[in-house]
Amino acid sequence: MTARRRPPCSGLWETPTVHVSGDLTTCCLDDHLRNRLGNLAESTLPELWYGDRIHRWRMAQIEGRFDDSGPHCNRCHWQAAGSYPPDRVREYLERTSVPGAAGRARDSQDEDPNST
Ligand code: SF4
C-alpha cells in the first residue's frame, strides 16, 4: 500500500455522530454506518470515541495510510470536516504516547495544505 499525501481528517477527532438507533460513527457523511464504532446502548461515548478501533484509524490517517483508516474514510473525498491541525496531531500523539510522535507531527505539518 502506498502512503498518500494528505493531512488527517478532523472528523476522526471532532465529529462523533449518533444515529437514531444509538449507533456511533465518525461523521455525518457516514449514512450507512461503514465507520460504525458501536452502539451507545452497549458502550459509553468515551469508551467508543477513545477506543482502540478509532485510534487505529486515526493513526492510519496521520501516517497517510488511508486504506487502513475507517472503511468510509477510504471512499470519502474528505471535504466536510477539514484537516486536523498539526499542533492537535502532535498533542494527540504525545497524549497517546506514540513512539516517534515528534517526527510524525512534523511530517503531518509539512503535508498540511492549509498551513502557512
Ligand atoms: S474522512 Fe470522510 S468519512 Fe472519514 S471522518 Fe472524515 S469526513 Fe468522515
Image: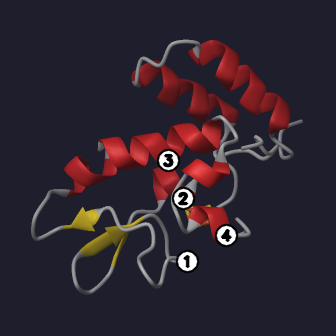
Relative placement, left or right, of 19 versus 115 is: left
The circle on residue 29 is 1
Q: Is mark 4 within 8 Å of ligand 1?
A: yes
**Quadrant containing ligand 1:** bottom right
> Dot 4 surroundings within 10 Å: few (below 14), some, or many (20 or more)?
few
Q: Amino acid type of disc 2? A: Gly
Residue carrying label 3: 57
Dot 3 lies on which element?
Answer: helix
Q: Nearer the viewer, mark 2 or mark 3?
A: 3
Q: CA distance from mark 1 to mark 3?
A: 16 Å
Dot 1 lies on which element?
Answer: loop
Q: Amino acid type of disc 4? A: Cys
Q: Position of residue 34 (x, y in %)?
A: 45, 73
N-terminal-most mark, 1 or 3: 1
Q: Are marks 4 and 1 in contact (CB under 8 Å)?
A: yes
Q: CA distance from mark 2 to mark 4?
A: 11 Å
N-terminal-most mark, 4 or 3: 3
Q: Is mark 1 within 8 Å of ligand 1?
A: yes
Residue carrying label 2: 11
N-terminal-most mark, 4 or 1: 1
Q: Position of residue 16 (x, y in %)?
A: 40, 63
N-terminal-most mark, 2 or 3: 2
N-terminal-most mark, 2 or 1: 2
Q: Are marks 4 and 3 in contact (CB under 8 Å)?
A: no
Residue at the location (27% across, 74% down)?
Answer: 23
Q: Position of residue 113 (x, y in %)?
A: 86, 45
Q: Quadrant of residue 77?
A: bottom right
Q: Is mark 2 within 8 Å of ligand 1?
A: yes
Q: Are marks 2 and 1 in contact (CB under 8 Å)?
A: yes
Relative placement, left or right, of 52 versus 22 is: right
Relative placement, left or right, of 41 versus 6 is: left
Residue carrying label 4: 76
